[in-house]
Amino acid sequence: MPLLENGHHVADRWTALPDAEPVPDDGPVLVSLDRLKAEADTLWTRSAPIGVRLPNDVPVSALVAAVGGALDRLSLIVLSFPAFKDGRAYTQARQLRDTHGYQGSLRATGDVLRDQLYFMARCGIDAVEIDSTDPEGDWQASVTTFGAVYQPASDDRTPISVQRLAALGRKGVAA
Amino acid sequence: MYQYDAHDQALVDQRVSEFRDQVSRRLSGALTEDQFKPLRLMNGLYLQLHAYMLRVAIPYGTLSSHQMRVLAHIARRYDRGYGHFTTRQNIQYNWIKLADAPDILADLAAEQMHAIQTSGNCIRNVTSDPWAGVAADEIEDPRIAAEILRQWSTFHPEFSFLPRKFKIAITGAPTDRAAVKVHDIGLRMHRDERGAVGYEVIVGGGLGRTPIIGKTLRPFLPKEHLLSYLEAIMRVYNTHGRRDNMYKARIKILVEALGIDEFRRQVEAEWEPLRDGALRLPPETYAAITERFAPPLYEQRTGSVATLVRDPETDPALARWVQANVAPHKVPGYGIVNISLKGTGQIPGDATASQMELVAKMADLYSLGEIRVTHEQNLVLPHVRLSDLPALWRTLDAGDLATPNVGLISDIIACPGLDYCSLANARSIPLAQALSERFSDMTRAQAIGPLHINISGCINACAHHHVGHIGVLGVDRKGEELYQITLGGRSDEAAALGRIVGPAVPAHQAIEMIAGFVDTYLAIRHPGELFIDTVERLGTAPFKETLHAAA
């Protein structure tokens, strides 16, 4: 499945590791949350990046606890959209970015459709696995659908309300 | 009323382009119906029994005469010459072709309208008091906050794929004309002990198959925290609302399952990091939105509706209409004119293109160009000079729009029912029509006084039958359409669910039962006592006796 990072079609450098397989010494590996909890001591001794799969019914607080409050030890968190209608991971993304200040990559997997990319990008998701013949075109088309936004989210777009106040020469709300 | 700026206009225009592209991908087969469905639903397009149904948003029920003319144009050009005003202050068209939908949205956008989020599992059109801004008992105009909520919820990236649809209502007056206690979130404006204005936040109300009166989540929320607090509520709901069973997916089920105290604890925990962040609403933001609601320019006048009714010079038919349909306005010399879409034998809430154009013309002549849609499926001209009432009444009467029955027994709320809707079990419209014929004597209707009958064609309760003074629910028993009657429901500040009286019966018997209940009420009421108050005082027992007497 094509992988987009920040809108660019790239090769996946991550090794998605089934729980039964041994952890290789080198290279970025993606593990389950259970394995991260169980093998934390050995996993953190590796020098290569660690990523984790976060199911959409697990609270973000459980992941934060599993890494001892240090989300910056993770380079990738993979979110799950089992069906496009199931929007729980949008909230997980915003909690990770806004509440916990996670800076690494957030990747959407599962039933990812072109028309959702706009919402995902605004929630701080920077990478997606999408079944498409033109993934870069899809990303570009979706994230540029709307020229402005009404509400603050986990991206750096300035909401219309703030633009209006600035235009009126008043103090903005997002100080 | 609210005027779009360049930002608002650009967003609805871009939405039209996006949907045009989505429709073309559907028509070419690039999108499956399954993939297209959530996209069309977020643009108000349903697939019904006979055709596509398009629901157009009328934010908090306010529209201009120009916008009403666009609604008439859509009815003529793309539908069969009429539209249906809904209990959520929107309008629906029942005979739409998919290929026309993008053009319709473009016509709407040209007059600052849209169908954004009128369906789908997202935050829907925010509803409010149809008399907002003009009601004599109002604290502040709730449409300012309603517009702020509209903008915040529009294309909200986190809350566009919720467990289920989400409805917010707001009232700015102590008399609740927005039914805030039966919404997912209800906001009731009031003042704290220091006189500051804020909101009681009510959560988990709703009707449908599990009717519940909402509970107070927070007695007083300062205005500046409105968005951050609602974002916290939505976040808890999006995370924990059930997704395994669509009939248990509304927030009311989550609130019941957790208990209001635990739900509150979770909301407060989510709110803590949000409350002083980018969602905070300083007075300047309220002021900036208020500015876009150009205030109506009233003249210095005197007089009240009551004086006009008592004046012996007033034509009795006009006086009767004024008494039933015209409400006191906050400005002296003006009245709030309610236009009944419940003429005898008429389909509740339906209006023809010609009627819409007539109302638009009357709004231009007599109501500063403004119109409202009520959740009772009527229309309102909110700023009418009392001296203009006779001329307005004569013109409306000529257009079959002066039925003097607003709030009375024949002002029936009904859903489209089995005549149109793929969910319905029974027809609502023919029963509503028959009841309006039965109670067509307006003198008697006024003697009976305020009485709401609500008829839903299935348990999804689009006509809010649980909160009708007399509620009627259509059910299907082995292919027969039967009607279950409830008494004592109400959706105002004393909101309560009706109680079932008697077995479900065929339509003709339901009509006799309701007529019997009315006779009983007239026989046992205290002088001046409303129907709902008699039911509250005595319970359903005296009415059940009527049933036994009739059996």
Image (cartoon, grey):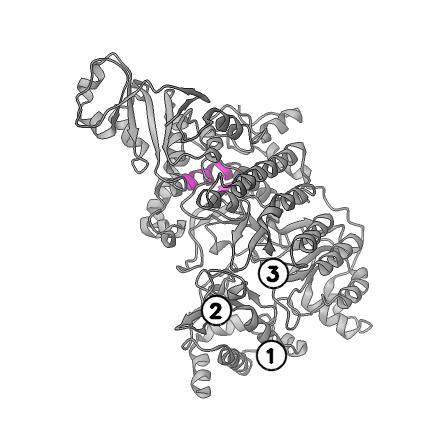
Q: Which disc, if any, is residue B438?
A: 1
Q: What is the crowding at mark 2: few (fewer than 14 residues within 10 Å), some, or many (at least 20)?
A: many
Which amino acid type is marked by label 3?
Answer: Gln
Q: In which quarter of the image is residue B14?
A: top right
SS of the residue under disc 3: loop
Q: Give the range drawn in magenta.
A: B221-235
Q: Mark 3 points at which residue?
A: B377
Name above or below for residue B194 compared with residue A24.
below
Query: Which residue type carries mark 2?
Result: Ala
Residue B277: where, in percent of width, then height? 48, 29
Q: Which of marks 3 and 2 is in front?
A: 2
Does residue B223 appear in this view?
A: no
SS category of the residue bearing label 2: loop
Q: Name the residue at 59% across, 30% down.
A: A160
Along the horizontal axis of the image, is A79 left or right of A173?
A: left
The label shown at residue B426 is 2
- Whole-angstrom CA distance, mark 3 to mark 2, is 20 Å
Mark 3 and mark 1 in contact? Answer it, CB < 8 Å: no
Residue visible at 62% across and 47% down?
Answer: B100
Element under disc 1: helix
Q: What residue type is labelled 1?
A: Arg
Which quarter of the rendering shows the C terminus of chain B? bottom left
